[in-house]
Amino acid sequence: RSSTRTASAHDTMSHTCANAVKLVNSPIVTHQGAYRRAARHVRWVRASAEAGPGSTAEKLGVVIVDHGSRRKASNDLLEEFVRMYREETGRPIVELAHMELCEPGIDVAFSRCVEQGATLVAVSPFFLSPGRHWQEDIPALTAEAASKHPGVGYFVAAPLGLHPLMATIVESRLETCMAHLTTGGGKCDVCDGTKFGCKLVKGAASE
């Protein structure tokens, strides 16, 4: 009976976790507060499931990789996003990587995950479109990194693509810019402190 109760509890937890993930990925959850509440629920369910009796779940490490830039400001953006992702999801093993042009590379980030106890590494491209980097370059670099760690599994996740929340993000940026231009509202976190963005320009009259 004890084993039956354990299995039943595990199945219930798995079902609840799956539903929570569906909630976070649903286009209905667009308000930032609601999204954070759903994300917290996923964290709670995930932690409960991993701590459950007889759990054989892999210890997941996440590598978030962008293209990489010679501009420090661009690379700092990924560092800030990784910090935000770590806080929002509650995942303990999250590392950043740049595909090229600067360090750390995928190999370094992969090794850092393993050093922290990861038995499965997810490489998540911080890219919008599923182009050549996602199809060829990142998988090749990840396979090379994984070859140094026998027994550790890995996979390359999908890029951002046409996720339903992307429409909400674009609309949020537009609303902030419009408010700045028409009612004197503040700049967004991207434009603030720079000389770029949020400038209303009218085309010259044709002769």
Image: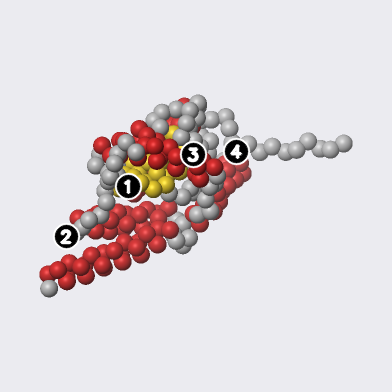
Amino acid tagged 4:
Cys
Q: Which mark is residue 12?
A: none
Q: Which mark is residue 198?
A: 4
Other-residue count near label 3 (Cα within 10 Å), few / some / many at <14 / 14–19 / ≥20? few
Which residue corresponds to the image point at 48% horizontal and 60% vertical from the top-left?
27
Residue at numbered disc 2: 53
Other-residue count near label 2 (Cα within 10 Å), few / some / many at <14 / 14–19 / ≥20? few
| Residue 138 screen position, x and y as percent | 46, 40
For the C terminus, the image quarter is top right
Quarter occupied by residue 43: bottom left
Q: Is residue 75 left or right of residue 154?
A: right
Mark closer to the chain start, 1 or 3: 3
Amino acid tagged 2:
Pro
120 relative to 111, above or below: below
Quarter occupied by residue 77: top left
Q: Is residue 92 left or right of residue 124?
A: left
Mark closer to the chain start, 2 or 3: 2
Mark closer to the chain start, 4 or 2: 2
Give the SS element for disc 1: strand
Give the SS element for disc 2: loop
Quarter occupied by residue 87: top left
